[in-house]
Image: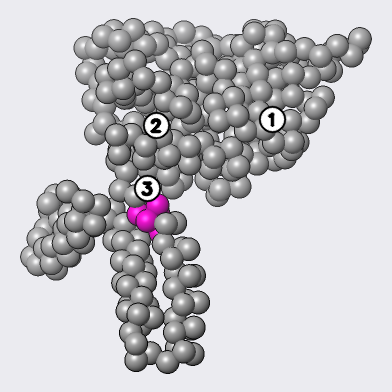
Amino acid sequence: MSFLDNLDKIITKHNDLSSKLSSELRGDEFIKMSREFSDLTPIVEKIHTYQTTAQDIANLKEIISDPSTDADMKEMAQSELISLEAGLPALEHAVRISLLPKDAADAKNAIIEVRAGTGGEEAALFAASLFGMYQRYAESHKWRFEILSLSETGIGGYKEASAIISGNNVFSKLKFESGVHRVQRVPDTESSGRIHTSAATVAVLPEAEEVDVHIEDKDIRIDTYRASGAGGQHVNTTDSAVRITHVPTGIVVTQQDEKSQHKNKAKALKILRSRIYEAEREKIAAERSASRKDQVGSGDRSERIRTYNFPQGRVTDHRINLTLYKIDAVVKEGDLDDFIEALISNNEAQKLAESVL
């Protein structure tokens, strides 16, 4: 089936859904069709724009080729034709992008986990910087940033930290941030001025709801213990900390930030559900792609994806060979849009290339 035939099929389907939604349809079927209609509407709008432009081009060509058209009219038509033909490929590209298979998790909220890697205290300080970077990025998009857990080192660093980011299409924006982030800078504790290299690991998980992952009570083991802060401070006198082990997968989640065992359990289950959901997504993706690796990276947490070089003021994303010389804007202000949009575009380009193979 040709590209144009596909467009007509989509318009027909959109019209059919519109008619059915106007009828007496109710319940789950109504909800399902409403969602499908809503997903198709922006695609149909792009198709209409593309088809209208293509038809305008055909009409202008007729005017130009018509012997009865006077010279002034032909000149005007020729000028407009050049403009429309120049813009048509971009309109077609937008339509093709909109037709690519969607990641079912793109519209979900995201759980972000940052852990200090190699580099000791400097790695913990860098982990704290990254966590703050994502918090400011979320704030700039009017997303809610709710801290789930913090494990501090005592001098401003984080051994690990996690948060849930809520808003529109959060996971679609942040999913390419998973991996190893490397920093090159002179630590505040370094008296000789020597540049150190350290790293932190970022994991971004789509927030899974109960409808996505159902956890059986028989499949989990829950242990409780007394929570403690950095260096043994703030020791709890009750067993409020929670460790949940998902026996079938071996995934373990601990949570101790809340004083209430009930709240810690609820947070731990939220994280556990999301880790199980992401593990299943990764398994399916691996099966689909076999040995092929995604150009923007596999999302493997052992993969180095980005380097932050403070002496040179640059940030480099190694997956797309993009270097920007605005490290303060990126790290201190959370200005990540240039990287994220480039990663999304690169991923779309790869999918387009695969769709025509």
Label drawn at residue 97: 3
State the SS at label 1: strand
Note whether 61 is above or below 42 in the view shown: below
Separation of residues labelled 2 and 3 (CA atoms): 22 Å
Q: Residue type at mark 1?
A: Val
Counting from the top left corner in percent of width and height, residue 69 is at 38, 90
Q: Residue type at mark 2?
A: Pro
Of the residues tagged 1 and 2, which is closer to the observer?
Answer: 1
State the SS at label 2: strand
Label drawn at residue 9: none
Note whether 145 is above or below 75 in the view shown: above
Counting from the top left corner in percent of width and height, residue 149 is at 54, 23
Which region shows up in magenta? 91-95
Q: Residue at x 27, y 19 (%)?
A: 287
Q: Residues within 10 Å of mark 2 (few under 14, many from 20)?
A: many
The answer to which of 28 and 75 lies nearer the viewer is 75
Q: How is the image coloured?
A: one colour
Q: Quadrant of the C terminus?
A: top left
Q: Earlier in the sequence, mark 3 or mark 1?
A: 3
